[in-house]
Amino acid sequence: MKIAVPQFGEEVAPCFDYSVTIVIFDIKNNQIVGEKEFTLSSQWAVDRIRLLRDQQVDVLICGGIQDRFEDIVRANGIEVISWVSGNAKDLIQKYLNRTLTSDTQKQAHP
């Protein structure tokens, strides 16, 4: 499984559409076993979505995302968990523990 998180430092970036860096985490047996950072030089959401698709990402965990871009990400078979904030690795662990979902929006990191 691969989980992508747009980041600002160690934190989830506030907006997928404008983040500069995205990290894709490789998950095996509910553990992070690798990660690769990508610089997002294009501001076009289509290029960002193409990167997710090309890297075979299964889940996108992000702060804000425009509705139309979220729809395109989902149409590419990628689960979207949005409107969360906090440390990226902590949020991934919550996702793996099944305690982070779209239903917990804005409550992931009190």
Image (cartoon, rainbow, N blue to C red):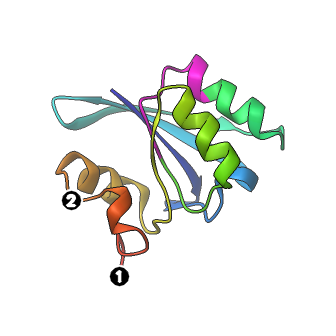
Is 36 in front, or is 72? 72
Q: What amino acid type is highlighted by mark number 1?
A: Pro
Task: Name the quarter where the N terminus is drawn.
Answer: top left
Q: What amino acid type is highlighted by mark number 2?
A: Thr
Q: Nearer the viewer, mark 1 or mark 2?
A: 2
Q: Which residue is located at x 72 percent, y 51 percent?
A: 17
Which residue position holds label 1?
Answer: 110
Q: Which residue is located at x 68 percent, y 44 percent?
A: 69
Q: Is residue 9 left or right of residue 45?
A: left
Q: Is residue 53 left or right of residue 77?
A: right
- Look at the image and tell me whether residue 110 can be seen: yes
- Look at the image and tell me whether residue 37 can be seen: no
The residues colored magenta run 52-60
Q: Which residue is located at x 65 percent, y 60 percent?
A: 15
Q: Say above or below: 97 vs 26.
A: below
* Residue 100 image point, x, y percent: 29, 58
Give the crowd class for mark 1: few <14, some 14-19, many >=20 residues within 10 Å: few
Secondary structure beneath dot 2 equals: loop
* Residue 95 image point, x, y percent: 27, 50
Which residue position holds label 2?
Answer: 99
Q: Is residue 27 left or right of residue 15?
A: left
Queried whether the magenta region covers residue 38, the answer comes back as: no
Q: Say above or below: 67 vs 30.
A: below
* Residue 25 image point, x, y percent: 41, 35
Queried whether the magenta region covers residue 53, the answer comes back as: yes
Which numbered marker is on residue 42? none
Of the residues under marks 1 and 2, which one precedes in the sequence?
A: 2
Q: Quadrant of residue 33?
A: top left
* Residue 22 image point, x, y percent: 60, 43
